Amino acid sequence: MESVFGLVGKDFAIVVADSSAVHSILVHKTNEDKIMLLDSHKLMGASGETGDRAQFTEYVQKNVALYQFRNGIPLTTAATANFTRGELATALRKNPYMVNIILAGYDKDVGPSLYFIDYIASLHKVDKAAFGYGSYFALSMMDRHYRRDMTVEEAIELVDKIISEIRSRLVVAPPNFLIKIVDKDGARQYAWRESIKDAPVAAA
């Protein structure tokens, strides 16, 4: 019952993901961060099998850092998207990763961009994207309310509408969501939308 979605605004991109770690009928935790900071100006939101998601996003993050270390310049968002797509395509014929990705970034000359990459290595540059059961509601809400010139405040208002719709309409809706943003000032956490909190674990 995962929900990951993103959109591009006037001079920023936003990625939102639920924070539930689920296996079968069990919820293990509700504060799992599914949006990886690849570098100072890139975000990777991922959904899919927990092990594949954690391993593959970390693999991409380390390779992006390695490229910058070797060459002295960071990969662009488009180059990162193509690298990610290439790794998924290679793995598809060996040991596939069951992971779907929304990649957001900000480049000085290009501005904000958003890429849709699915588990069978399809790659598309888009203005809005969503994965998981929440995508049924996220995509329809964005089709109705999204504009390319949205301000941050307008985009967050739309994000809150989507989260409210998912919580009220999805049978097994994730309770908590994490919002991250990337713009000229870098990639960072913007806000949590929590309806429940994990209880602290008592010391033994």
Image (cartoon, rainbow, N blue to C red):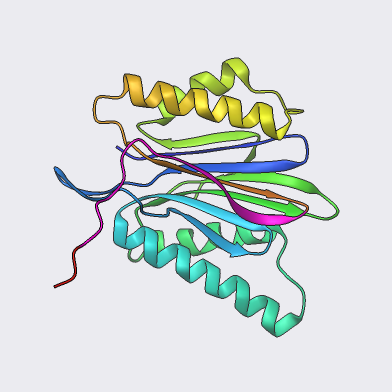
The part of the chain drawn in magenta is: 185-201
Please provide percent x and percent y for residue 160: 51, 28
Residue beneath the point at 43% across and 53% down: 34
* Viewer-proximal residue among 110 and 155: 155
Q: In the current view of this chain or complex, which residue is farthest to the top?
A: 144
Is 39 colored magenta in this rendering? no
Residue beneath the point at 63% across and 61% down: 80
Please provide percent x and percent y for residue 107: 77, 55
Residue beneath the point at 43% across and 64% down: 56
Is 198 colored magenta in this rendering? yes
Q: Quadrant of residue 124?
A: top right
Q: In the current view of this chain or complex, which residue is farthest to the bottom?
A: 70
Residue beneath the point at 35% across and 35% down: 195
Q: Is residue 117 above or below residue 41?
A: above
Q: Is residue 120 visible?
A: no
Quadrant housing the C terminus: bottom left
Please provide percent x and percent y for residue 179: 53, 43
